[in-house]
Image: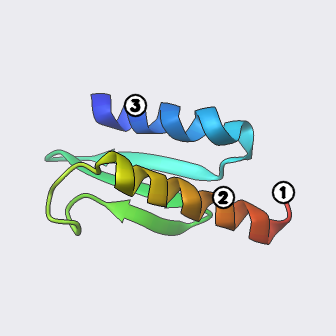
């Protein structure tokens, strides 16, 4: 759970309340990240590893693109 909280802090630091993001810590150490209803990250699907900074930057870029496409 601490990593999920850290990821949330990273995302909301950059996007504040504009970020349509939901982080869902799931049983057995799973973690899923959704933005605008689209799944951006699923720890189980990505081999059970927590994302490194490079992957977190990719997730943040996807969020930015989503916001831009919505005209925020």
Check whether the beta carbons of the residues at disc 1 and disc 3 lie within 8 A of each other.
no
Q: Residue at x 69, y 36 (%)?
A: 16
Q: Secondary structure at mark 2?
A: helix
Question: Which of the two labelled residues, at mark 1 and mark 3, occupies the earlier sequence position?
Answer: 3
Q: Residue at x 55, y 41 (%)?
A: 11
Name the disc covering residue 6, or none: 3
**Alpha-carbon distance for marks 1 and 3?**
24 Å
On the image, the x and y values in percent for residue 55 come to 36, 56
Q: Secondary structure at mark 3?
A: helix
- Label 2 crowd bin: few (<14), some (14–19), many (20+), radius 10 Å: some
Residue 7 location, quadrant: top left
Residue 40 location, quadrant: bottom left
Q: Residue at x 52, y 70 (%)?
A: 38
**Alpha-carbon distance for marks 1 and 2?**
9 Å
Which residue is labeled 2 in the image?
64
Considering only vertical position in the picture, is 44 above or below 21? below
Q: Secondary structure at mark 1?
A: loop
Picture quarter with the N terminus: top left
Check whether the beta carbons of the residues at disc 1 and disc 2 lie within 8 A of each other.
no
Which residue is labeled 1 in the image?
72
Q: Is residue 33 visible?
A: yes
On the image, the x and y values in percent for residue 18 come to 74, 46
Q: Residue at x 62, y 63 (%)?
A: 36
């Amino acid at each position: 759970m601490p990593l999920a909280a850290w990821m949330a802090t990273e995302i909301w630091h950059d996007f504040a309340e504009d970020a349509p993001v939901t982080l869902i810590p799931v049983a057995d150490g799973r973690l899923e990240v959704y933005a605008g209803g689209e799944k951006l990250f699923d720890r189980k699907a990505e081999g059970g590893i927590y994302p490194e900074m490079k992957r977190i930057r990719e997730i943040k870029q996807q969020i930015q693109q989503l916001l831009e496409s919505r005209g925020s």
